[in-house]
């Protein structure tokens, strides 16, 4: 019995212990499950946050790439727009110049018509006098001797007066020829003293590279380095199959200079990526600005011209990178300055004023692509704004006859400008274009009624037109000459001025 009770007690104790253990294990399991659940939730939250951050980074990268593409597109469109505006400004300038020339031609044509009217009036007067003399002769036949002597003496006096006028005309003509000879001698002397070399205009610059393997690095992944370079410098980068070279293309010489410096520094540095490109391009722009100012100061010092404001010095430096008809504008301006100085010295003018106006006469060309109007008018306003003498301003404004000449020096600057622009070798031209221009000039002259032959001479700066005397009279020859010159001016592009010389010759012969 005691054994049974003991067994029952043991069993009851075991059952109670088992229950306690079970409760303890259940609590531990429940607590462990809660910890595992919290850890799982925490890990799930971290995975979710990491995924969100990754998506945000991808979105930012895409947004940044889209922004850069938009900037490149906007820069490209802006460059195209600026180029179109420059071309439109150039066309507008040409239209204004042609209008001014047309007005000048119309004025000269009106003067010629007025002279023709005066000649007709004189012709009528001569006819009237001839009739009066005829009547007088008829009266002489019936006059007394003394009265006839008086009439004869009066007639002889008229003949003597006419002969003296012919003699005076001959003297005046000889004086004019001597003056022309003297002027040619002065101009030739001045040109010999002011002779300068010319630089060929280019729209491209070639940069040497150590090896062709660099081309791939310069292009960059999907062309990103080229895009960054063109956006930073405004210059087109051409990488082709030409061995050992890369070409920079732009009509703006300053930009090409900046692009050349940037590319050379990149090649020397070796770190070629968009950030480095932008950094070196900024440095090259600062270097170019200093270089431009140095060029302007050196030119002014060499020509002994002082007192120029910084803006004018900078414009002179920028002119080193500008060309007109493939003639370097700065070298042309220096040549005009020297010619104007020498001409003023020969003719007793103000040599310093002439040299200063000659150097500054084309400063408007460095800004005419950005400001509307003729470069002469723009240059005059720039000079006035920078405190230049009004005589210098007038010489700049009048050097293409867009304003009246107010001083001798203004005339000399215009003459020097024409000499520098039209002398042989000053402005480069291909033989093919030269022959086309010569042929076109001769063809235009032959279109007019009464023209027998036409020859372009003096390197295309003069055309001689021979007319048929039975079709072209003395009175309408000047009008025909003006019409030929006007048509050539409208239809042919040529540097400087072109002279039209019309020859009307009539010969008689008889056997004796």
Image (cartoon, rainbow, N blue to C red):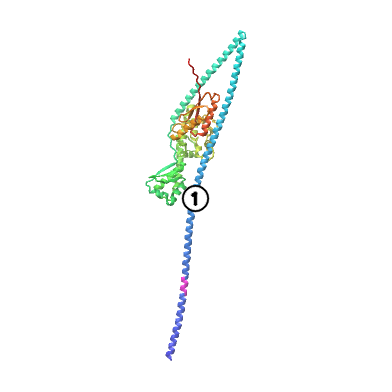
- Position of 173 compared to 210: left or right? right
* Quadrant position of residue 198: top left
Q: Foreground residue, 493 or 13?
A: 493
Q: Is residue 123 visible?
A: yes
Q: Residue furthest top?
A: 145
Residue 107 against residue 288 in the figure, above or below: above
Q: Residue furthest front?
A: 511
Which quadrant of the rendered structure holds the N terminus? bottom left
- Residue 34 located within the stretch drawn in magenta: yes
* Quadrant position of residue 287: top left
Q: Residue furthest left?
A: 211
Which secondary structure type mostly characterizes the magenta part of the structure? Answer: helix
- Residue 209 located within the stretch drawn in magenta: no
Which residue is the site of mark 1? 71
**Magenta residue span:** 30-36
* Quadrant position of residue 196: top left
Residue drawn at 45 percent across, 49 percent down: 227
Q: Is residue 402 visible?
A: no
Q: Foreground residue, 80 or 346?
A: 80
Residue 207 against residue 50 in the figure, above or below: above
Please, what secondary structure does the residue beneath circle 1 have?
helix
Q: Position of residue 208 (x, y in %)?
A: 39, 44
Q: Foreground residue, 33 or 458?
A: 458
- Position of 145 compared to 320: left or right? right
Q: Could you tell me how many numbered marks the image carries?
A: 1
Q: Position of residue 69 (x, y in %)?
A: 48, 51
Q: Position of residue 230 (x, y in %)?
A: 46, 47
Q: Position of residue 176 (x, y in %)?
A: 50, 23
Q: Residues within 10 Å of mark 1 (few under 14, many from 20)?
A: few
Residue drawn at 47 percent across, 75 percent down: 30
Q: Foreground residue, 278 or 256?
A: 256
């Amino acid at each position: 019995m005691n054994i049974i009770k003991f067994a029952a007690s043991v069993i009851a104790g075991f059952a109670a212990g088992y229950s306690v253990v079970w409760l303890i294990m259940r609590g531990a399991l429940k607590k462990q499950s809660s910890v595992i659940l919290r850890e799982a939730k925490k890990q799930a939250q971290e995975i979710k946050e990491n995924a969100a951050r990754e998506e945000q980074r991808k979105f930012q990268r895409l947004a940044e790439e889209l922004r850069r593409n938009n900037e490149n597109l906007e820069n490209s469109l802006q460059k195209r727009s600026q180029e179109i505006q420059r071309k439109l400004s150039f066309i507008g300038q040409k239209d204004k110049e042609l209008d001014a020339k047309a007005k000048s031609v119309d004025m000269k044509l009106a003067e010629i018509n007025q002279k023709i009217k005066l000649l007709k009036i004189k012709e009528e007067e001569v006819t009237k006098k001839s009739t009066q003399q005829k009547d007088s002769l008829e009266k002489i036949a019936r006059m007394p001797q003394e009265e006839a002597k008086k009439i004869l003496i009066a007639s002889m006096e008229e003949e003597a007066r006419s002969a003296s006028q012919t003699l005076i005309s001959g003297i005046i003509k000889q004086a004019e020829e001597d003056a022309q000879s003297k002027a040619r001698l002065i101009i030739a002397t001045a040109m010999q003293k002011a002779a300068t070399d010319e630089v060929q205009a280019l729209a491209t610059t070639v940069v040497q590279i150590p090896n062709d393997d660099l081309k791939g690095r310069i292009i960059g992944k999907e062309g990103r380095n080229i895009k960054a370079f063109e956006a930073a410098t405004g210059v087109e980068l051409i990488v082709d199959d030409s061995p050992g070279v890369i070409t920079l293309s732009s009509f703006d010489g300053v930009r090409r200079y900046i692009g050349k410096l940037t590319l050379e520094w990149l090649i020397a540095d070796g770190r070629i990526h968009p950030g480095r490109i932008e950094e070196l391009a900024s440095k090259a722009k600062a270097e170019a600005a200093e270089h431009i100012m140095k060029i302007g100061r050196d030119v002014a010092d060499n020509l002994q011209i002082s007192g120029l404001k910084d803006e004018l010095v900078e414009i002179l430096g920028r002119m080193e990178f500008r060309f007109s008809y493939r003639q370097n504008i700065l070298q042309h301006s220096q040549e005009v300055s020297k010619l104007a100085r020498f001409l003023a010295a020969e003719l007793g003018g103000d040599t310093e004023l002439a040299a200063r106006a000659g150097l500054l006469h084309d400063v408007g060309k460095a800004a005419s692509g950005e400001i509307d109007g003729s470069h002469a008018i723009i240059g005059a306003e720039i000079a006035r704004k920078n405190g230049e003498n009004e005589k210098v301003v007038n010489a700049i404004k009048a050097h293409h006859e867009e304003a009246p000449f107010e001083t001798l020096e203004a005339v000399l600057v215009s003459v020097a400008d024409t000499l520098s622009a039209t002398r042989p070798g000053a402005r480069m031209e291909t033989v093919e274009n030269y022959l086309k221009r010569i042929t076109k000039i001769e063809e235009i002259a032959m279109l007019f009624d009464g023209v027998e032959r036409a020859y372009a001479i003096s390197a295309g700066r003069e055309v001689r037109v021979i007319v048929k005397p039975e079709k072209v009279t003395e009175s309408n020859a000047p009008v025909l000459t003006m019409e030929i010159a006007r048509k050539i001016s409208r239809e042919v592009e040529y540097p400087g001025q072109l002279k039209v010389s019309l020859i009307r010759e009539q010969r008689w012969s008889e056997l004796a």
